[in-house]
Image (cartoon, rainbow, N blue to C red):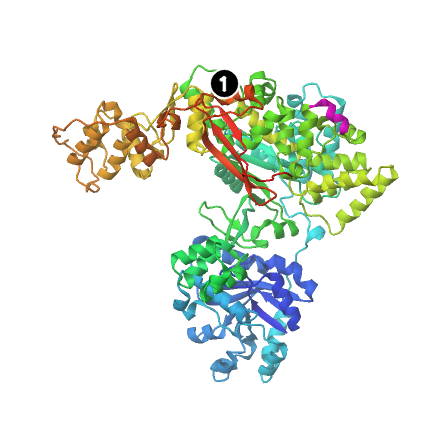
Amino acid sequence: MMYLNCHTWYSLRYGTFSVEDLCRLAQSKGAINLALTDINNTSGCLEFLKLAPGYGIHPLVGIDFRNGARQQYVGIARNNNGFRQLNEHLSRHLHLKKDFPGAAPALPDCYVIYPFEKVVADKKTAFAANEFIGVSVESLRKLKFSPYLEFRNKLVLLQTVTFRDKKDYNAHRLLRAIDNNTLLSQLPTSEQGKLSQQMVLPEVIRREFEDYPHIISNTKQLIENCSVGFGFGKKAGNKNLQVFGKSREEDDRKLLALCYRHLPRRYPRPSEEVLARVKKELEAIVRLGFVPFFLINWDIVRYAKSKNYPFIGRGSGANSIVAYIIGITNVDPIELDLYFERFINAYRSSPPDFDIDFSWKHRDDVTDYIFKKYANTALMGTYVTFRRKAVARELGKVFGLPKENIDKLSAGFFRYEALDELERLVLRYSSLIEGFPNYLSVHSGGILILDEPICNYAATFLPPKGFATVQIDMNISEEAGIHKFDILGQRGLSKITDTIELIKQNQPSAQIEDIENVSVFKNDPNINNMLQTGDCMGVFYIESPAMRGLLTKLQTDSYIGLVAASSIIRPGIANGGMKEEYIKRHRIPEKRKDAHPVMYEIMPETYGVMVYQEDVMKVAHNFADLDFDDADVLRRGMSGKKTSKGQIGKIERKFRENCRKKGYSEALVEQVWEQIASFAGYAFPKGHSASYAVESYQSLYLKCYFPLEFMVAALNNGGGFYDVETYLQEIRKCGGKVHAPDINKSDHPTVIFGRDIYLGLGYIKELETKLIGQILENRQFFGAFKSLDDFIDRVDISIEQLGLLLKIGAFRFTGLDKHHLLWKAYFKLRKGKSLSKQAVLFRPRHRDFELPEFTTNRLIEAYDQMELLGFSLPGHFELLKHPMQSNLTAQDLRKHIGKPVEIYGNLITAKRTPTVNGKYMYFGTFYDKEGGVFDTVPLPREADIST
């Protein structure tokens, strides 16, 4: 039997089950011809084409075109060209946010089916050759008494499938209420489907249409003329751009020329090892057809360099010497002994991974360049799903529950027995809807650059930033041979560029080392001492308490040590006990004897402990005699990557058999395998850690020699792991003086003049962004404000907004007390916003007033700052009511090991961790009165925390 209009949950906030559920439903009903036609969406089509044959289904794909819930027509693709035409038609309207017209455009390789009810309403009598009238079991009764009964060749079966049962229908109504932001009781019938939209049994359809065999015949003929096909998995091929320049041969020559031209820059005197590695990689890259992939990444990086945008090339691409030589990465794979097979091997049909990080300020421009340079480009889509808390909140609104009841259900603080019937209903349907796709969003960094038009595979939509985004996610796209380029944004790189700009402004004569010359930083003892002491506040990736604690435990004082620490901090290594073992062996050379001789020989750099993803490959190859290709398949499987079914089991058997042949004990083999397994989904590739370490060293250099500019840049880029107050304390520790916002000194972000740091006007809560722009623009054109009267004459401002500036002390340059100025402001400005936006031709004369003396103190100042900034500038230690009973500081703690101490600290951050007996312990980080940081571990009272 045949169903030409089936919906899944990709009919967002309408459909109620997955693509696979639709296939199971069809199989249970004996349906063999099925068209997936989600509402204004083709997200499920590729998945349906992949899954359907396994359920004995002949799959058709198309789109149910609707304006809101109002159905216009259903389009079904006759072939791949037709699928593209449907996607293009849908994309045009989604991009322009236009309604679909009542009549479909010319779609020559598609069939267009108008629902019978719409045909009747529109009195449509003219139909193109590929246009039909869709009749359902329900509408058949009306057809019998309609003139459209005579349109024998145009009638086809259109039985819509949206629900499996009444439960699905109820969930659908809830989704529609959520989508319409209305109470369920007030949901219009026009905004919901009908309960009859189910997959009725084939015998029911045959019985109902017994007198209309031509309708069934027409439908069968339509179905037989439809065939859309894609390859999946190994049959998919590579859909990415196949030629970068004019031809494959030219691309091959270009990559070789680039590589050998830039070789002397990276390796002035290349060794035989380097030359052999270059030759080996180039041969593999050309043989496997990955040359365009390298050239596209090189082109993107070249554009960034032309704009002086900093970037970090990371991912497994850092294992490639070719990538290092042509400038995609800054990680030397020879220095770090990185395996190329971690990046590319004979088993790999998909392009390898490059993750390229840009500043969050520059990524959009880089993306814009990619879209303009390459024809078939789109951002990768992703689905945001309904989460339990959110869906409970939404359903609570739909059912009209009071806010306190909704908060209770969303937070999960309730006893089920104490809930009323309506609350239990919310929970029941929350569990059903949880996990449904809610809306389409944009992948964090994926960009598609394809050989053929994007609409060959799916429709696109247009998010606020204006880049076309495909309606499929990375999972099904990779199955279809569509592989993303990862262009990501981060704030760590912005800290670097902003620091350099601040140094040029604040210290014009300062000599700044080339930030790309990382080898200088790696060998600087001052920078390495910062690592050793954990002086990393504000530094990308290594500023967290856990990371700083690890660096001090390891006494890390080198680039190689930092690369190891960046990977050791990951959960897989820590959970497997390898982190503590590594620390012991690093600090106590005698402990290195505990390593198995073979493991120590394989990994001398990490004392026989597996630290990186590559170590899985090393152990598999050297310990168990697996070849590199098998070793990388094992590594991919253990790191959560997709592998062919049964591959890991097969390789595990081979691993164990080879180990037995080599005479290892069963206990040792099991121990090594368990270490490999503990890596699953967590361990970093060494090249990834090395890339992060490069950026950390760049930041450490700036913090070491230009600490104030660096910390200001950190603040202006959203800080990092800690809050603003902690970074301000770090500025004071580095010798800076922090000032409240000033109307003549401050900008929107924080600024620095010598050692004086003025907080940005943007920090003042409730101060309007538009007003800040007006103030700065006026100051730029007409100079500094001379007085409060001058400011009032020049800036259109309400008394409420002016009050914020006065309370924070932004007019302290006048030498007048802020309370005095506040009274004057209230006399000079009427309450409420000013009525005129025009400039004043003649300035009015300002009256002055005799005011009494006002008294103030720093406590009042601190309270105002807490209210308007969220923190006080004097710092907590200066606001203590009683003097401290101890002068002990963080740097004194080493002198009191094993002794009880009393130390005063301001809490920076705390992490709660459960103990084995169900109680909680905390890891707390504090700074002392001098800005020194120390960590504490408060334990639960009378708790056994042994592990």
Label 1, on which residue? 705
Indicate whether 17 appears above or below 366: below
Closer-to-camera residue (101/432)? 432
The N terminus sits in image quarter? bottom right
Q: Quadrant of the C terminus?
A: top right
Q: Can residue 380 be seen in this view?
A: yes
Residue drawn where x is 53% and y is 58% of the image: 434
Above-or-below relation of 62 to 556: below
Q: Main secondary structure of the magenta part?
A: helix
**Residue 372's spot in the image, x, y percent?**
51, 41
Q: Which residue is drawn at 51% across and 73% down?
A: 195
**Residues rendered magenta in the picture:** 588-594
How many numbered marks are there?
1
Within the magenta stretch, is there residue 589? yes
Residue 283 appears in which quarter of the rendering? top right
Residue 870 inside the magenta-drawn segment: no
Q: What residue type is labelled 1?
A: Tyr
Q: Is residue 781 rendered to the left or right of residue 192?
A: left
* In-image side of 466 versus 52 (left or right): left
Q: What percent of the width, then of the height, locates residue 591?
A: 73, 26
Front residue of 485/568: it is 568
**In-front residue for pair 399/246:** 399
Give residue 100's position: percent from left, percent from top.
45, 62
Residue 264: percent from the left, percent from the top?
66, 21
> Residue 199's image quarter?
bottom right
Judging depth in this view, the residue of 853 and 33 nearest the camera is: 853
Q: Is residue 66 visible?
A: no
State the residue lying farthest toward the front: 942
Where disc 1 sits, the SS reads: helix
Pointer 1 local density, CA inside 10 Å: few below 14, some 14–19, many at least 20: few
